[in-house]
Image (cartoon, rainbow, N blue to C red):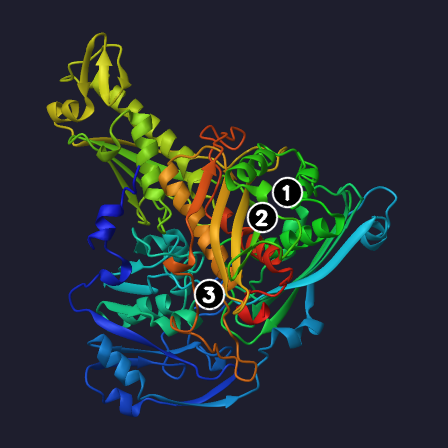
């Protein structure tokens, strides 16, 4: 079915965080640092305080009281504007509050800041020699003393280093927070992938009982990991609203979104693969390095994919990090796996070239029924079928094994492929289903829909379980006052929330049956009653649940159910897929163009094919952007992002994207849950950039190991 929330979004009826305008609203505007490292010596706010409409200006010298809060690695470690330390260019160092947005913005321009600036650590390349190790994993066959010994034992070995630049999320919706207090209770509308996360953070930094917070965010205009957690503008806005006794709204400018709310780290990976002449992998060595910000602890683990994808008796993965004075590094769609797959899947193709093997055949050869590092069997894996179906649908047999030999006029034509994979899991979630007297069913939980189709999944699963049309199901997402469902992240929304929706629908049916048999005015009182197709039935008689509730004068019956974490520990869980693409490179200008794409997906039960396909297409589009366009440029001298605007940071547009063919195998993973659905939100992104790079090599004979693949690298 089409998206449940599609009509309200395309007509403008959907209410996003910044669309809320409570009475008496004031507007916040962040002050941000123009140096990347140093100490603020003074901030002159006198002129700004006299500007029209200004209500208050908060700085480290006149702060809002905020306490440190425990936080995962993907964001700020300390509350904003509590001290004079500057850790990156664009850091929030103050908040101007005025009667209008324009007044707040104009007053902010009048604040002058004097800093004792230091030269920032802003070059990833320069920092590589001093990278700090975080962990090492070795899986070695009996009798093998080191990974290097294992590499030497192979007949053919390839070694290369692959790099990826910083990227940013650039979701259509800028980050925004609106806060208003009623006594000691506060309501917060904020762009987030998890309202419960915001409640937890705010309760700590404002030192208040979590029960005093209500965070609401039913619609999210894209996130990709960038809205997973709470960023500085949110606690500042909530604290300012409390201090001023009136609602406050802060919406980040597009340039502030580039710096205040995080980016994907840079990575460098050296991959060594050793194989027997028949293509059997003997050893896999992957040393990965990620950047991280001095302002937080998050860094990617790009080498991890080498522990999970291809069978080899000998595996080695090391992880290191380089600390830079740059904005916070954070999760971005398929963190670690996206960058990791570019290196591993490019190296596989280089090995296939050295062996004289077809790239698909090499991957088939090393497909494994067990997790390479742990030895646990996969819960459900049909990757081999993905290769077969994908190759046939795409026409892989027409690929020339000799790079640079297929042309079409001025264009060199190449075909490439890569494996897609991402971890699958099922966490704990609670959902409420309320059957109303108007014949509708309301399904509620704190889950978020970032455009991923989660609200549609709620509607589909509840309608299926209740036996009613989908149009009679009302999903309610993104409200911290509802039962705690899964946040949107880690490709775990449907696999976690879906089973809870099914259980809650069953529990609501049981509650209705109990009412029908026990209510004295019920026509089914004391009878054997069942519920099917939206009706209460006894013998040959049936009555729609809405009609029954109306006749009894009962507005609704409801039930909440909790689905536990996946208890299975003797299997490994992942989703799989195969990308195939065609790339054309202009022989005169070096311009690369992706012209065809096919992806076959093994991700368990597909709840709704329309929205699921959109997720895979979205991941592929981001992969094409990663491969050919996206490059967040950090100026080594200043630590400033040199292209922090939508005019300068390039992302794919419609003209860059070919038709994308997506096929789902649809094998339920019943070890994960009775529903059998695994995650797909990040799967389409994994391997996509490598497929493009491999096709570029097939077209031109040039192996590009440093993303993005721009035309200057192909001339």
Residue picked out by circle 1 = 360
Give the mark toward the camera: 3 or 2: 2
Q: Position of residue 594 (x, y in %)?
A: 48, 56
Closest to the observer: 381 or 64? 381
Position of residue 447 relative to residue 174, above or below, is above
Position of residue 604 relative to residue 258, above or below, is above
Image quadrant where one finds the C terminus: bottom right
Q: Position of residue 557 (x, y in %)?
A: 23, 30
Is residue 73 in view?
no
Q: Are marks 1 and 2 in contact (CB under 8 Å)?
A: yes
- The mark that comes first in sequence, 3 or 1, is 3
Task: State how far apart marks 3 and 1 are (Cα).
Answer: 32 Å
Is residue 396 in view?
yes
Task: State how far apart marks 1 and 2 are (Cα).
Answer: 8 Å
Residue found at the very far right of the displayed protein: 143
SS at mark 1?
helix
Q: Give the number of marks.
A: 3
Q: Quadrant of residue 158?
A: bottom right
Task: State how far apart marks 3 and 2 are (Cα).
Answer: 25 Å
Q: Position of residue 71 (x, y in %)?
A: 49, 60
SS at mark 2?
strand
Q: Quadrant of residue 129?
A: bottom right
Q: Which mark is residue 168?
A: 3
Residue picked out by circle 2 = 417
Query: What residue sits 51% from the left and 77% below the top?
Result: 87
SS at mark 3?
loop
Image quadrant where one finds the N terminus: top left
Q: Which mark is residue 169?
A: none
- The mark that comes first in sequence, 3 or 2, is 3
């Amino acid at each position: 079915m089409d998206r449940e929330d599609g009509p309200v979004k395309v007509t403008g009826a959907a209410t996003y965080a910044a669309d809320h305008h409570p009475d008496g609203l004031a507007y916040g505007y962040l002050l941000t640092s123009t140096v990347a490292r140093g100490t603020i010596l003074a901030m002159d706010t006198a002129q700004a305080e006299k500007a029209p409409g200004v209500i208050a200006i908060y700085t480290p010298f006149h702060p809002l009281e905020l306490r440190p809060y425990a936080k995962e690695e993907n964001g700020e470690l300390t509350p904003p504007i509590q001290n004079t330390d500057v850790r990156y260019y664009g850091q929030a160092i103050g908040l101007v509050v005025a009667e209008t947005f324009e007044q707040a913005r104009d007053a902010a321009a009048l604040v002058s800041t004097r800093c004792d600036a230091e030269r920032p650590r802003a070059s990833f390349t320069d920092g590589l020699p001093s990278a700090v190790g975080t962990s090492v994993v070795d899986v070695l066959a009996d009798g093998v003393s080191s990974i290097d010994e294992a590499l030497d034992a192979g007949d053919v070995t390839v070694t290369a280093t692959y790099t990826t630049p910083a990227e940013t999320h650039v979701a259509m919706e800028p980050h925004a927070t609106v806060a208003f207090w009623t006594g000691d209770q506060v309501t917060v509308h904020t762009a987030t992938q998890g309202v419960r996360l915001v409640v937890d953070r705010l309760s700590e930094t404002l030192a208040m009982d979590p029960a005093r917070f209500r965070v609401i965010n039913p619609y999210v205009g894209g996130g990709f990991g960038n809205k997973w957690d709470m960023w500085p503008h949110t606690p500042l806005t909530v604290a300012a609203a409390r201090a001023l006794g009136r609602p406050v709204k802060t919406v980040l400018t597009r340039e502030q979104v580039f710096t205040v709310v995080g980016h994907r780290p840079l990575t460098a990976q050296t991959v060594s693969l050793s194989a027997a002449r028949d293509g059997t992998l003997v050893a896999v060595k992957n040393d990965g390095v990620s950047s991280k910000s001095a302002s937080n602890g998050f860094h990617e683990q790009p080498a991890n994919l080498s522990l999970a994808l291809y069978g080899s008796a000998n595996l080695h993965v090391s992880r290191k990090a380089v600390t830079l004075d740059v904005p916070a590094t954070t999760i971005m769609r398929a963190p670690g796996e996206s960058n990791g797959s570019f290196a591993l899947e490019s190296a596989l193709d280089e090995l296939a070239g050295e062996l004289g093997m077809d790239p698909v055949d090499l991957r088939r050869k090393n497909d494994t029924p067990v997790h390479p590092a742990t030895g646990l069997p996969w819960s459900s894996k049909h990757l081999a079928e993905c290769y077969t179906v994908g190759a046939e649908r795409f026409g892989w047999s027409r690929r020339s094994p000799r790079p640079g030999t297929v042309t079409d006029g001025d264009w060199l034509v190449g075909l490439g492929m890569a494996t897609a994979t991402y971890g699958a899991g099922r966490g704990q979630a609670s959902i409420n289903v309320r059957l109303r007297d108007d014949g509708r069913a309301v399904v509620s939980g704190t889950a978020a829909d970032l455009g991923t189709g989660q609200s549609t999944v709620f509607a589909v699963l509840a309608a299926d379980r209740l036996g009613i049309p989908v149009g009679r199901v009302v999903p309610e997402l993104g409200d911290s006052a509802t039962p705690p469902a899964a946040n949107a992240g880690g490709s775990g929304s449907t696999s976690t929330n879906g089973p809870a929706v099914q259980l809650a629908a069953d529990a609501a049916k049981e509650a209705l049956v109990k009412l029908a048999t026990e209510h004295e005015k019920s026509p089914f009182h004391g009878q054997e009653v069942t519920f099917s197709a939206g009706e209460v039935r006894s013998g040959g008689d049936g009555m729609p649940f809405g009609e029954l509730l109306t006749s009894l004068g009962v507005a609704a019956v409801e039930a909440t159910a909790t689905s536990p974490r996946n208890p299975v520990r003797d299997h490994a869980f992942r989703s799989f897929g195969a990308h195939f693409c065609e790339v054309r490179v202009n022989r005169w200008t070096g311009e690369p163009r992706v012209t065809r794409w096919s992806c076959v997906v093994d991700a368990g039960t597909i709840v709704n094919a329309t929205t699921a396909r959109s997720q895979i297409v979205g991941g592929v589009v981001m992969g094409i952007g990663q491969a050919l366009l996206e490059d967040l440029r950090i100026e080594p001298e200043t630590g400033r992002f040199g292209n922090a605007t939508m005019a300068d940071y390039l992302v794919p547009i419609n003209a860059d994207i070919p038709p994308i063919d997506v096929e789902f195998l649809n094998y339920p993973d019943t070890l994960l849950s009775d529903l059998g659905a695994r995650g797909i939100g990040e799967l389409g992104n994994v391997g996509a950039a490598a497929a493009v790079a491999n096709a570029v090599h097939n077209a031109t004979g040039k192996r590009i190991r440093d993303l993005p693949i721009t035309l200057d690298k192909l001339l």
